[in-house]
Amino acid sequence: MKEKRPVGRPRKNWTAAEQDVPLRVEVKDDQQVGHLNVRPHGHARNELEERINDLGDSWETESLFEDVIEDITEDRFFDDVDAVSPEQAVRYRQLLRAVGPQEFYSRTIDSGAISAKKLLTAFGIRPPAFLEGLSDDAYFGLLTLAMSRELAKRAKLVKYNTIDDAVQLLKKSRNIVVLTGAGISTSLGIPDFRSKETGLYSQLEKLGLGINDPQEVFNIDIFREDPTIFYSVAKDILPDTKGLFSPTHAFIAKLQNMGKLLTNYSQNIDNIEANAGIRPDKLVQCHGSFATATCQKCGHRVEGDTLFADIKAGNIPRCVKCIAALRGNGTMKRKRSYNKSTAKKGRRRSSDDDDDDDEQYDIPTAGVMKPDITFFGEELPDEFSQRLVKHDRDIVDLVIVIGTSLKVAPVSEVVPYLPPHIPQIYISRTPVSHINFDIDLLGDCDVIVAELCRRAGWDLDHDMIPPNQKVKTKLEDGYKSRHIFSAA
């Protein structure tokens, strides 16, 4: 019986000539090989795909690796396992891009320079516990996937690294795309979604709503089946800013007023951009907002703030147009009270249920109003793709991502979709590993944008920015382009 190669291990009889790659490479900057003779990513991925397709009956193991790789990927280097140093990790990622996966294997694993288990850490992968104690061959499949993910990323641009580089980009750019998330509103008391302790999803898990996943609060099918789940928590995410906006919102408005803002793609549903004066023609609310609401029965649309009193009281808002029609026909009947304490948790409508659900509802009833936020299972607004594809992609000259981890598709695909030669700046509390930004500015968003404006010589007047604010900055260990900001 012919012996099989270890999972994910490359064929040893591939030569450098077959790969058409240079044998010697000098690299100097983290995650950047734009100045090298680099093979197209597609070719490298084809090699990986060929190896994966040649795994035979080991597909179950590969599937397992794909399932767990997100859980064991970390955005910072490891100090509690046998791991490469930050500087070594940079060099290994550069080498992979420069010479391709097959030669990379030859120079690292096959040469005995490093184990596959330890090499995983160069790509931000923590060796999983379920492989502990196995031979090094057991890690090859996971390493192959890690390499494939790295090659699929945009390569960092070598000439942009410092805070001053970021300032100069701001000053010279005229068509800036700004992509924002919940992190730009947290200073106003609005929670983000994914922070481990304070995020909305973390809080929802503690409420016992009878759902399997806190994200189901924003699932359109569940809303249509039982809107009480959404409205039981809606008051906690309802924007109650009374015209307030954060310094980061003010920063985006300043870019607009200086003629520099191409588009602000916002994932936020709080509509605070309007408070800051960001014009509708410069704003795409990718996930909708509370600004308007629509009846789920007749389609009647109203201003969102007309629902706020009901939402704050924990009531399900009903359509006034439906109510008027029912009264006019003399058929208005009250909806029976809904006893949350006796409701079946996690209930899903089955095919045996009465479509009219007569036991719980008197019929007819007025339609339920739903804020025009985009739930899971709903399509994003047409404006999102139309503007991105037909307008912004061709003229953008700088990309700034602020206060988002970019983990929700399709908005997460905006940055990779834009031309890779366009500079990209990332501003948030924590870094991300699935996208290579040119400059990472880490810390409080409000502090960072205020400091950028100060260095650019721009006034950013805002009550939340202390007079003569002093900001400390330092490089994160192992990086030339990752800067940590803190207010002194």
Image (cartoon, rainbow, N blue to C red):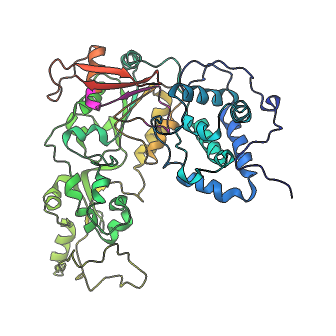
Which residue is drawn at the image coordinates 71% and 33% (left, top)? 112
> In which quadrant is the C terminus drawn?
top left
Q: Nearer the viewer, residue 124 or 445?
A: 124
**In which quarter of the view is residue 232 placed?**
bottom left
Residue sticking out furthest to the front = 133
Instruction: Report the residue at 19% width, 43% height from top.
Output: 189
* 484 sits to left or right of 113: left
Image side of residue 459 versus residue 66, left or right: left
Indicate the quadrant containing the N terminus: top left, top right, bottom left or bottom right.
Answer: bottom right
Write the residue at 29% across / 30% down. 252
Above or below — where is 291 with respect to 41?
below
Residue 426 coordinates in the image, percent (x, y) = 40, 30
Circle count: 0
Q: Against 247, is 293 above or below? A: below
Magenta highlight range: 432-447
Which image quadrant for residue 29? top right
Percent position (x, y) of residue 197? 29, 49
Q: Residue furthest right?
A: 1
The x, y position of residue 278, in whole percent, is: 26, 34
Q: Which image quadrant is residue 483 in?
A: top left
Task: Indicate yes or no whether the magenta region holds residue 433.
Answer: yes
